[in-house]
């Protein structure tokens, strides 16, 4: 098997199945990775991502030895593979599995972290690198490169932290970290694409505004497309009631429509990542009530599984790529230089994240000061949120490859240097920061607090369900004026809660009857 | 969207996502196809395959008009796409969903239909075409081509019939049609590959023997590899007990190992189709007992869904391909000539299938004459079995493309003629024969017989379970001699039943404790 391995190291569609060997090897390693990840699950330090990276690096070493130093790759990196096949399931699953109640309840906080946060972080990292890199003798990057670097290193990887936090024990913290992780991924990709469209030859005061406008355009059109596809799917499933016949067909429709939403977004040059995310949210909010019980169980697990495989795949790839000596040799930086530059980037990541987590948390607490229902974000929680977003992962790698390589290959020393830097930063943050996540969380949220085996904070949600129907609007029209006044003052005092309440009302009255959902909470009264 | 459509009509991995448009269009049509298929499900004449072909042809027409007669394709046919991505899920699912008790109980009958039948059918079609084609003025095909044509048109497509038969009402018939369908697919692909290896320059009396030897080698090594991978997966799942942690991981392991078995078979130049089939059988026999309840439900639906999508995809493709005028223009035959040749092939298919279904059924009935437990195959059943295998489908198309094109493109008039002939035969048999399947089955198995809403014949299986423990061998050694004599005479009188009983014994005692399975039937006695 060793003989001729290097000849087959590219994934390519051709008649004589040259892709069979790399795919077989890669799948075998993926399986190995999952078994090892399972065995190490109880371990204090390690997590899935770290396992995958280490297994990847080990496989890379073996392949390097077999191919006598020629290559450490099993598969050549392919942006399309990543953006067309691996990323959509991850993001769709995030949207599908998100606890919508918590997510929408903390919607504004999550959005401020996920959107404003990325802008702040991008600004700090872009300016920081632009200021420091030339001082380290690392010159030649363009303004577009610096802006791209800002977005590349603003996309976080919260998987590691989410594996440790428990949704039932610290619901607010969990939903903030999870929500931010998702919105952040989407924002950085959209911002990255917006940066690509800047014309740097005619730069002026309006450029920043134009980037922001472009961002907003992409953000809203993509969201609307995702919502549209999600609603169409729900409507089709509800109207035709596929469950009468087959779970298989329902599942197929859901999977295909989810994928179609992503493809349509790409077709119209929108952000597929946002579209597929909102498509996932809508499908889980409406469509999953229109299908049979077994379809519901199955779809949840299918999307989780696809996402899991895609994630492991990516980390495994990053692991093998770390040993790619071609890039190291091409790089304009020495090993010491790479370490210097990577340290600067890591420091800027720490700084850029601190610069928005703490102020925005304080601001959120201030906004929610009048709401008894919302817990405030304690300082300990702020530290965990800050830490949770320090790891850099798959999206960073993918964006870096998109910016600095042509289908994974680069001959430019500067570009090669940036790719190796990205890999070093991803490895360092995932391995080192990832290592300390469990101890940190256990230290800040001590064991006895985080081990009152679940269900303790659960009473919060049924209570919420029980109070909502009391806010019913189905009364005489005479009270409408005073109500409107009340609502307005409520909107100012408790903006998030009020918006959420109106949305629930609208959803129960107009949306659910058409697109499907559980029977409204005040139905049982009849 | 119409503008520039033809420029994007090839599926290719490239940086600027040229595959986005065809993939979007194709997925949208797939969804449409499923919705239409669902709406027509109650229809008397139509089935899934026919719907997909018609929708495909309609889309082909639209694309033909948009591209002003240049092309009717959305995706260029790719053997690798078919053999590496579409076929494995279909075959794996067949193995995974097969009712193992029925399958193994009728094992010898199924194997004789599926293996000996393909040999007989291939012989008749090969000799028939070799004898008739030159008389029609269709000359120039080589001996290898004729043999390939034999195997191409010996692979059946039983999907259509299986949609109509009911497992509970006619269990024997269902398991025979289903089992033959699966084994037949595998056999024709293996035989096709064996034919490819013949050296026609040094042909002699031993050639047929060598093909048969090659076939047996491929058959057994592939089966053993599939069994091996299935057992390893079961063992891993049982030993590590993934269920303790996550359904996601269990599912991922099952999906990846299934795919790995196929890839490994391709790697060692074996028959992936046989390997993945037996891997599916083993996984459903052992592994699915080692996973959580939700994994069990999910895995069943996931595999069914993947198979369903792949099947619809293939028929949709065949539909669009029917209008590919390039091939029609390249063909050495006129339209009338094509119809003549196709009619000959269709007649040979009818003959070739009759030549083994009826004799082998009689033989099976003769072998089972002493067994009270086995029903015999009535003449009506024989007619249905014969009819069920007349449709030609995806495998025929794929093999024809493999033999007569280079990645879906051909410039040779003879090859183009054979491809168009194959498409015409597939269309004709699927549409015309498919159309009459429901009426035929309803005529032969009248409504009142086939509508005693299920469960009627179910008592048969629990009885079987209850009698088996009575045949226990855990008695004193003194009775062993007389038992051995009894067993031997039993083996001669009721070969199938006896083999099956020994296998059950072995399975319960040695295999299930190691690889997992339901607790043995005699366990509750303790």
Image: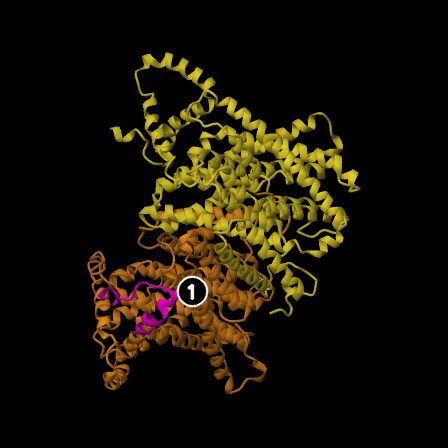
Chain colours: A orange, B yellow
The image shows residue A232 at horizontal and vertical percentages of 45, 66
Indicate whether B355 appears above or below A90.
above
- Residue A525: say if magenta: yes
- Tell me the crowding category of disc 1: few under 14, some 14 to 19, or many 20 or more residues within 10 angstroms, Cα based: some
The image shows residue A454 at horizontal and vertical percentages of 23, 58
- The residue closer to the viewer here, A188 or A383, is A188
**In the rendered view of the protein, which quadrant contains the C terminus of chain B?**
top left
Indicate whether B510 appears above or below A98.
above
- Residue B220: say if magenta: no
Given the image, what chain letter belongs to the residue carrying mark 1? A
What secondary structure prevails in the magenta region? helix
Q: Residue at x 23, y 85 (%)?
A: A478
Q: Quadrant of residue A176?
A: bottom left
- The residue closer to the viewer here, B251 or A242, is A242
Observer able to see residue A95: yes
Q: Quadrant of residue A431?
A: bottom left
**In the rendered view of the protein, which quadrant contains the N terminus of chain B?**
bottom right
In the displayed structure image, the side of residue A440 where residue A96 appears, left or right: right
Observer able to see residue B150: no
User: Which residue is disc 1 drawn over?
Assistant: A235
In the displayed structure image, the side of residue A495 where residue B401 appears, left or right: right
Boundaries of the magenta span: A504-526
Indicate whether A71 appears above or below A413.
above
In the displayed structure image, the side of residue B465 where residue B156 appears, left or right: right
């Amino acid at each position: 098997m060793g003989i001729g391995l290097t000849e087959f190291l590219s994934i390519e569609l051709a008649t004589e199945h040259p892709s069979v060997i790399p795919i077989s090897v890669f799948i075998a390693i993926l399986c190995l990775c999952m078994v090892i990840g399972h065995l190490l699950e109880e371990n204090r330090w390690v997590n899935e991502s770290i396992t995958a990276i280490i297994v990847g690096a080990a496989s890379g070493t073996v392949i390097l030895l077999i191919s006598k130093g020629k290559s450490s790759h099993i598969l050549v990196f392919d942006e399309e593979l990543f953006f067309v096949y691996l990323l959509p399931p991850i993001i769709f699953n995030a949207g599908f599995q998100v606890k919508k109640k918590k997510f929408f309840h903390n919607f504004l906080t999550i959005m401020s972290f996920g959107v404003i946060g990325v802008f702040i972080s991008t600004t700090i990292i872009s300016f920081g690198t632009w200021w420091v890199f030339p001082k380290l003798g690392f010159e030649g990057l363009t303004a577009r490169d610096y802006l791209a670097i800002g977005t590349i290193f603003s996309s976080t990887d919260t998987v590691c932290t989410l594996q440790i936090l428990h949704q039932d024990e610290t619901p607010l913290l969990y939903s903030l970290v999870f929500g931010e992780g998702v919105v952040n991924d989407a924002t950085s990709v959209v911002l990255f694409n917006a940066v690509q469209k800047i014309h740097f030859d005619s730069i002026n005061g309006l450029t920043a505004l134009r980037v922001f406008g472009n961002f907003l355009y992409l953000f809203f059109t993509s969201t609307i497309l995702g919502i549209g596809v999600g609603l169409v799917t729900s409507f089709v499933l509800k109207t035709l009631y596929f469950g009468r016949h087959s779970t298989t067909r329902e599942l197929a429709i859901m999977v295909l429509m989810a994928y179609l939403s992503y493809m349509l977004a790409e077709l119209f040059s929108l952000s597929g990542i946002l579209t597929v995310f909102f498509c996932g949210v809508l499908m889980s909010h409406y469509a999953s009530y229109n299908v049979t019980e077994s379809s519901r169980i199955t779809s949840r697990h299918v999307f989780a599984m696809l996402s899991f495989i895609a994630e492991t795949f990516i980390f495994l790839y990053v692991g093998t790529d770390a040993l790619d000596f071609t890039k190291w040799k091409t790089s304009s930086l020495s090993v010491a230089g790479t370490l210097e530059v990577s340290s600067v980037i890591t420091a800027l990541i720490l700084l850029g994240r601190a610069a928005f987590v703490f102020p925005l948390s304080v601001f959120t607490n201030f906004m929610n000061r009048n709401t008894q229902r919302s817990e405030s974000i304690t300082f300990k929680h702020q530290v965990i949120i800050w830490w949770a977003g320090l790891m850099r992962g798959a999206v960073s790698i993918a964006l870096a490859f998109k910016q600095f390589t042509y289908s994974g290959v680069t001959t430019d020393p500067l570009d090669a240097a940036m790719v190796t830097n990205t890999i070093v930063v991803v490895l360092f943050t995932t391995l080192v920061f990832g290592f300390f996540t469990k101890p940190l969380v256990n230290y800040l949220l001590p064991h006895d607090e985080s081990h009152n085996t679940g269900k303790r904070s659960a009473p919060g949600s049924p209570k919420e369900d029980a109070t909502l129907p009391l806010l019913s609007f189905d009364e005489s029209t005479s009270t409408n004026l005073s109500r409107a006044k009340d609502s307005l003052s409520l909107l100012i005092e408790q903006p998030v809660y009020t918006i959420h309440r109106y949305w629930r009302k609208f959803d129960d009255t107009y949306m659910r009857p058409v697109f499907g959902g559980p029977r409204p909470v005040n139905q049982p009264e009849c």
